[in-house]
Image (tube, helix red, strand yellow):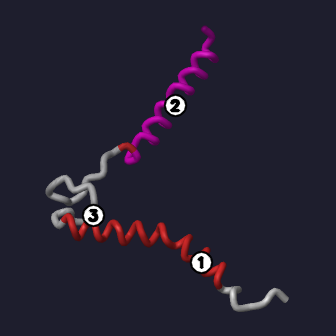
Amino acid sequence: MSPFQTRVISRAVRSHSIFRQSTQGPAFRRYAHGHAEHQEIPFSTENKKALAAKCVAYMGTGFMIPFIAVYYTLTKNKGKGDN
């Protein structure tokens, strides 16, 4: 192997290792939060009825918005004639 090839290979290996070290920094570290217990959701699940009501209200609102928009669109021209 010629000295030129050795130099090129050694530069490639060094540049790759520097690049690899710089990209494996904080991106792969686990996030440590201040919760004492493992709580994966940001709300309480102690009261099951309240949780069910909140879920129904949250999901029901999001599900009903397109239907309300269609109803509004269809009924806004009902009183007007076809001129």
Amino acid type assigned to the residue bearing label 1 in the image: Tyr
Which comes sooner in the sequence, label 2 or label 1? 2
Q: Secondary structure at mark 1?
A: helix
Between disc 2 and disc 1, the foreground one is 1
Which class describes the residues within 10 Å of circle 3: few (<14), some (14-19), or many (20+)?
few
User: Which residue is tagged 3?
Assistant: 42
Quadrant in the picture for residue 54: bottom left
Q: Which mark is residue 71?
A: 1
Residue 72 located within the stretch drawn in magenta: no
Q: Nearer the viewer, residue 66 or 79?
A: 79
Which span of residues is magenta-colored? 1-27
Q: Residue at x 69, y 86 (%)?
A: 78
- Look at the numbered discs 2 and 1 and tell me whether their residues touch, using CB distance below 8 Å: no
Q: CA distance from mark 3 to mark 1?
A: 35 Å
Instruction: Kindly report which numbered mark, 3 or 1, lies closer to the viewer in this rendering.
Output: 1
In the picture provided, is 59 more to the left or to the right than 67? left
Q: Is residue 30 left or right of residue 74?
A: left
Q: Is residue 7 above or below residue 40?
A: above
